[in-house]
Amino acid sequence: MLSLMYGCASVPFDAPKPASYAFDSSATANTFLGSRVEALSAAHPNQSGFFLLDDGIDALAARLLLSGRAERSIDAQYYLLHNDVAGHLFLVALLQAADRGVRVRLLVDDITTAGHDVDMAAFDAHPNMEIRVFNPFSRSRGRFLSGATEFRRINRRMHNKSMTFDNQVTIVGGRNIGAEYFEAQEVSNYNDLDVLGIGPVAQEVSAAFDTYWNDPVAVPANLLVSIENATAELDKRQAAIPEFIANARQTPFGAALESTLLESISNNETPLIWSKATVVADPPQKAQQGYRGDHPEQLSSVMGPVVRATEKELVVVSAYFVPRQSGVELFRSLTERGARVLILTNSLAANDVVPVHAGYSRYRKDLLEAGVELWEVRAEAKRESRQRRGLGYSQSSLHTKAFTVDRRYLFIGSFNWDPRSVNINTEMGVYLDAPDMTVPVLEHFEGRLQEIAYRLRLDEKGKIEWVGWENGEEVIYHNEPGASFWKRFTAGFYRLLPLESQL
């Protein structure tokens, strides 16, 4: 039966598909974005300019505004693309760019595209827009059978997140495309981080994108899904745009539609930080069954030596953090030679993936005994950006993936410090040698730690306690703060299961 199901597999990995590549930056130098990049870069030869996108609405606005200014190309690569207002605004921006004659290439992982084949076929029907699906499930057998019979392949996902415009400006970071990543959900949102980069860094991101786009595992949507009257479906979506935009202006995303961020950066009113930077991306072959994790270009292989070379301080912010014993020993080796190691991750109450918290919790005591400063984000942490925009209270969950070394080097990307990011999913990020950006980021981060997180420590009996602060006073917790009994019980159950390699 299994052989029969394998034989019926219909993922057309071997079907011919046209290769395409980013336009050379010299060919886009006369575009609006190219001319602005040239003007801003004139005093900074061979460097890239960066602006941190730590505000969710600004992060969405940057994507929408740059899509509106692109003249030749938009290349977008995302793990998740949600069916909500943020996702629709993103797709509308791409469709409007394609209508202007911009070549749009959209590469999405297949993990959450269930039920959206008609949408993909419709957008792919646009003559200037092409969609490819990375490591797709079999459409003929369905997701359950495809996952059950090809688990070793299906388990490997493309977790990369990038968006590049005219090969001149790029956005890289931790955000997927969905309302909670841009801080506009009413109930719960993510604390997340992207970086906007101009100059050589954009060309590096484009080169990484091309390797994924042309990889055999990236299957054109028109080979994977087929519907009648795809053009008619596209026409329906185009006709609905004016009403959708009018309605979106009445939501918290209206601020993104009215943003002047791009003009502020373009006119140098919002100064960029200039530095040399390196884009680090796993090879797309990492998503193939049988891949061995010893490729010299693999992100963990490139960044490992940077971390091990820490002299004074390593600060890690990772939404999902499962260090395993090898990670504990790495951190211990750093503290033993006098370096400070600070780690911020989610508390159980804030973590949206309980099995990951279960895997992490095994190592908390070892980390504390190794001299690590361990902090966990509070689920009810205040969100400055929402308060600033009058959006009110919402629960918080950490989604940022970043780390700094010696207050000089800064990494921002999609990489979590867990086995899945190291060994299973593909990841990417940008690595900056930029003290002028790193130091202010750390000072702001440290200034808010007591407001947004609990610090963990061992009591006199060697048991973990959580220290929180309320109105400047310490409050001590002896169980996972803010987490229900059921969530604590569930995490304890998952700790008994042999899941760690998959977390």
Image (tube, helix red, strand yellow):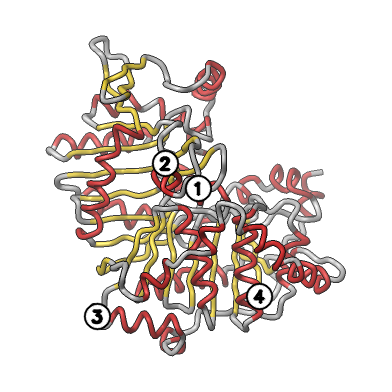
Mark toward the viewer: 3 or 1 = 1
Q: Residue at x 23, y 62 (%)?
A: 433
The amino acid type found where label 2 is placed reads Arg
Label pair 2/1, CB-CB below 8 angstroms: yes
The amino acid type found where label 4 is placed reads Met
Which SS class for mark 1? loop
Mark toward the viewer: 4 or 2 = 2
Give coordinates of residue 250: x percent, y percent: 62, 55
Q: CA distance from mark 3 to mark 1?
A: 36 Å
Q: For the residue carrying disc 3, how many other residues have a C-alpha within 10 Å: few (<14), some (14-19), or many (20+)?
A: few
- Front residue of this view, candidates 409 and 262: 262
Q: Residue at x 65, y 52 (%)?
A: 84
Q: Which mark is residue 129?
A: 4
Among numbered discs 4 and 3, the one appearing first in the sequence = 3
Q: Is residue 87 left or right of residue 163?
A: right
Q: Is residue 332 left or right of residue 495?
A: left
Residue at numbered disc 1: 183
Among numbered discs 3 and 1, the one appearing first in the sequence = 3
Which SS class for mark 2? loop
Among numbered discs 4 and 2, the one appearing first in the sequence = 4
Give coordinates of residue 26: x percent, y percent: 41, 88
Residue at numbered disc 2: 383
Q: How many marks?
A: 4
Residue at numbered disc 3: 45
Give coordinates of residue 206: x percent, y percent: 46, 73
